[in-house]
Image (cartoon, helix red, strand yellow):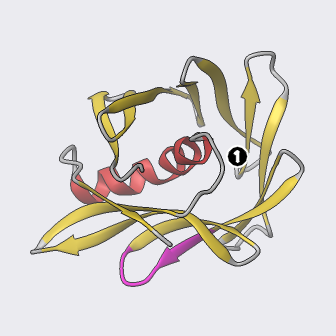
Amino acid sequence: METTRNWQKVNEKKYIFSVGEKKVGELDLSFKRLKRTALLNINGELFSIEQIGFWKNKLRILDAKENCILMATPENWFSNKTKVVYNNIQFQLKVRNNPLAGIVLLQNEKELLSYGLKSNNGKIIIEIESNQKQEGYLFDFLLWFLFRPVAQEQTGDDFTFQSLLMS
């Protein structure tokens, strides 16, 4: 049973994701003009994340053959909810700020995965909660891509993680 999910910063643009003691993959960020993209290597499979649209508020994940496998579109321009379609299945991303910042992936109103900030003995930590029944870690990479700037702003480079397995 997996218990601990961690992101380790290698440098300003590269992070390694591990579950327990096993390295799962890497996320390599790229910043060009106002566009933020990332290359993902998840257990040897290559993907890319790119922001699209006029306001760069839409997001898509492409596989190695540049097929769109995931599309994320905000419900409207001021919403804290984003519709995510992956393998023809609809999910929802929701930004929370109670009591601290967080982002959660839902399916039929059930929380599957969340990344959020939590206070622990006066120190801000990153809490990852997972209730995913499916294989793969693509959603972890998506949520870290979106949540990393918030986490870095609040914790600096000192990422401390707490992973919880929801039932």
Which image quarter: residue 38?
A: top right
x 54%, y 23%: residue: 43
x 42%, y 50%: residue: 1
Callout 1 crowding tier (Cα within 10 Å): few <14, some 14–19, many ≥20: few
Q: Image height check: is 70 above or below 82?
A: above
x 32%, y 41%: residue: 20
Q: Give the structural element (helix, strand or loop) at label 1.
A: loop
Q: Amino acid at mark 1?
A: Lys
User: Residue 88 at what x, y percent from top left?
Assistant: 89, 50
Q: Which residue is mark 1?
A: 56
User: Residue 24 at what x, y percent from top left?
Assistant: 45, 30
User: Residue 28 at what x, y percent from top left?
Assistant: 47, 25
Give the camera-side residue of 111 and 32: 111
User: Residue 155 at what x, y percent from top left?
Assistant: 23, 56
- The magenta stretch is 94-100
Which image quarter: residue 65?
A: top right
